[in-house]
């Protein structure tokens, strides 16, 4: 917080998990850093629709292997993938219960986009991107 002069951490958290406090808020408390959660309690499908319609480049960075989402890794969230997620009633549409995680590489308000190279790694429960290189590129 002090080293980088950060006052507020913005997170994409949407809801409580297993009735626990927000983990990021708990981690930020000792430093006094504030946490802003602009997506908190919003409707899942609406969030994803807004990401797509506003041209955010959001990729799948981690998936639970038992949910058959491994082919999504490294790919941008699309309406086709959202339709596939809707078919599985065991998956929170936005991945809130650990079904998947994402990474934003580009957004309308970014001055540059993030470009990365990665490989896919797996453990017993998850498949995930192992980032090899990153760079910022002009839009």
Image: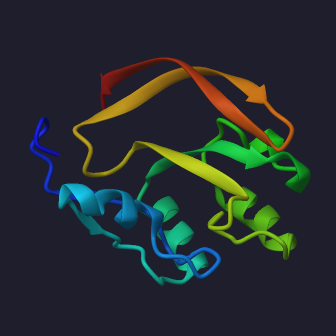
- In the visual, does 20 lie left or right of 40? right
Q: Is residue 93 left or right of residue 54?
A: right
Where, by quadrant of the figure, is residue 118 drawn?
top right
For the C terminus, the quadrant is: top left
Q: Considering depth in this image, is 138 or 133 the residue closer to the camera?
A: 133
- Residue 31 is situated, as x and y percent measured from the top left of the image, at 21, 55
Note whether 136 is above or below 42 in the view shown: above
Residue 110 at x, y percent in the picture: 26, 44
Q: Residue furthest top?
A: 133
Left or right of 26? Residue 138 is left
The residue nearer to you, when weighing 33 against 61, is 33
User: Which residue is at a point 73% across and 58% down the rendered structure image?
Assistant: 99
- Residue at 46%, 64% in the rendered image: 23
Residue 136 higher or lower than 24, as above or below: above
Determine the residue positioned at 35% across, 33% down.
113
Q: Is residue 120 above or below residue 103?
A: above
Q: Is residue 37 above or below residue 101?
A: below
Query: Which is more toward the observer, 26 or 64?
Result: 26
User: Number of numbered discs present?
Assistant: 0
Estimate the x, y position of residue 39 in percent, counting from the top left. 41, 74
């Amino acid at each position: 917080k002090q080293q980088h002069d950060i006052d507020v951490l913005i997170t994409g958290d949407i809801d409580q998990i297993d009735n626990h406090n927000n983990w990021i808020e708990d981690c930020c408390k000792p430093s006094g850093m504030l946490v802003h959660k602009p997506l908190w309690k919003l409707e899942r499908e609406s969030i994803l629709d807004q990401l797509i319609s506003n041209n955010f480049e959001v990729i799948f960075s981690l998936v639970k292997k038992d949910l058959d989402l491994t082919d999504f890794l490294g790919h941008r969230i699309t309406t086709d993938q959202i339709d596939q997620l809707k078919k599985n009633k065991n998956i929170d549409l936005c991945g809130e219960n650990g079904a998947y995680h994402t990474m934003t590489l580009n957004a309308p308000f970014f001055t540059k986009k993030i470009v990365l190279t990665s490989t896919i790694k797996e453990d017993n429960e998850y498949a995930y991107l192992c980032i090899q290189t990153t760079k910022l590129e002009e839009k």
